């Protein structure tokens, strides 16, 4: 069974992430979307909230599982028997960082390959920070996040004031 993992902060999941998930799910027997900790970021949503967002937006994909993990991605891949790490590549600006992470992960776990899926052109500019910024300023995020979570993001921003 070919198992791939798609890691990220997903704070929150966007239509760009969903595009990668839908396409990657056709390439592997199983795709595990895993909410991870990025030491450089202070997330707005808890790991559980981010996992719930992912679960309700990927419920139509039978071979997709959502999980959470805090630790090294290379260890998680070994633990889950994954042969591939999937990452989305948006623009040249992503390349250097992704290249560095892919090489580091291969050093830490030589049994896992990183593959890059090019983001669909319409989502090239998208990021989770941009979504949060728009929502915090009262803007509509319907064009950027899956419909199922738009209202929850809006309510959360209202609650946080
Ligand atoms: N569509 C839309 N947005 C996308 C996207 C796509 N296809 N692909 C990436 N993005 C956005 C993300 O939302 C994120 O936005 P943000 O910076 O506003 O939050 C940004 O692009 C960067 O994404 P990414 O490079 O995947 O970073 P991340 O924070 O989501 O995930 C981890 C990074 C969690 C995978 C990485 O830090 C990690 O592996 N941590 C575990 C610890 C570890 O193993 N460290 C050693 C790694 S070598």
Image (cartoon, helix red, strand yellow):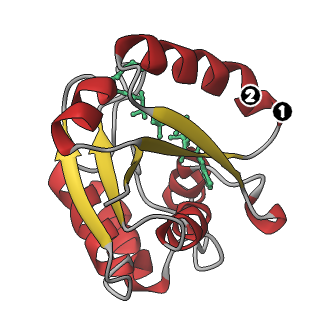
Taking 97 as reference, is 37 left or right? left
Q: Which residue is depicted at the point 41% across and 51% down?
A: 10
Q: Nearer the viewer, residue 43 or 63?
A: 63
Q: Position of residue 4 (x, y in %)?
A: 40, 52
Q: Position of residue 2 (x, y in %)?
A: 37, 57
Query: Image quadrant for the N terminus?
Result: bottom left
Q: Which mark is residue 95?
A: 2
Label 1, residues with CA under 10 Å away: few <14, some 14-19, many ≥20: few
2 over 95 or under it: above or below: below
Q: Are marks 1 and 2 in contact (CB under 8 Å)?
A: yes
Give SS at disc 1.
Answer: helix
Q: Which residue is depicted at the point 20% across and 54% down?
A: 67
Label 2, residues with CA under 10 Å away: few <14, some 14-19, many ≥20: few
Establish whether ligand 1 lies closer than 8 Å to the Cβ of label 2: no
Q: Which mark is residue 92?
A: 1
Residue 27 falls in which quadrant of the image? Answer: bottom right
Taking 134 as reference, is 37 left or right? left
Establish whether ligand 1 lies closer than 8 Å to the Cβ of label 1: no
Q: Position of residue 13 (x, y in %)?
A: 45, 60
Residue 126 falls in which quadrant of the image? Answer: bottom right
Give SS at disc 2.
Answer: helix
């Amino acid at each position: 069974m070919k198992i791939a993992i798609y890691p990220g902060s997903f704070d929150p999941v966007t239509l760009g992430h969903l595009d990668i998930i839908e396409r990657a799910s056709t390439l592997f027997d199983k795709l595990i979307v895993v909410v991870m900790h990025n030491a450089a970021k202070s997330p707005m949503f808890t790991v559980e909230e981010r996992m719930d967002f992912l679960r309700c937006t990927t419920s139509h994909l039978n071979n997709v599982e959502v999980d959470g993990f805090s630790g090294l991605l290379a260890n998680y891949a070994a633990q889950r028997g994954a042969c591939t790490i999937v990452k989305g590549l948006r623009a040249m600006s992503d390349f250097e960082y992704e290249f560095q992470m892919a090489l580091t992960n291969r050093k830490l776990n030589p049994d896992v390959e990183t593959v890059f899926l090019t983001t669909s052109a319409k989502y090239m500019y998208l990021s989770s920070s941009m979504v949060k910024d728009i929502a915090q300023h009262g803007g509509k995020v319907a064009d950027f996040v899956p419909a199922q979570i738009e209202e929850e993001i809006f309510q959360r921003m209202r609650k946080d004031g």
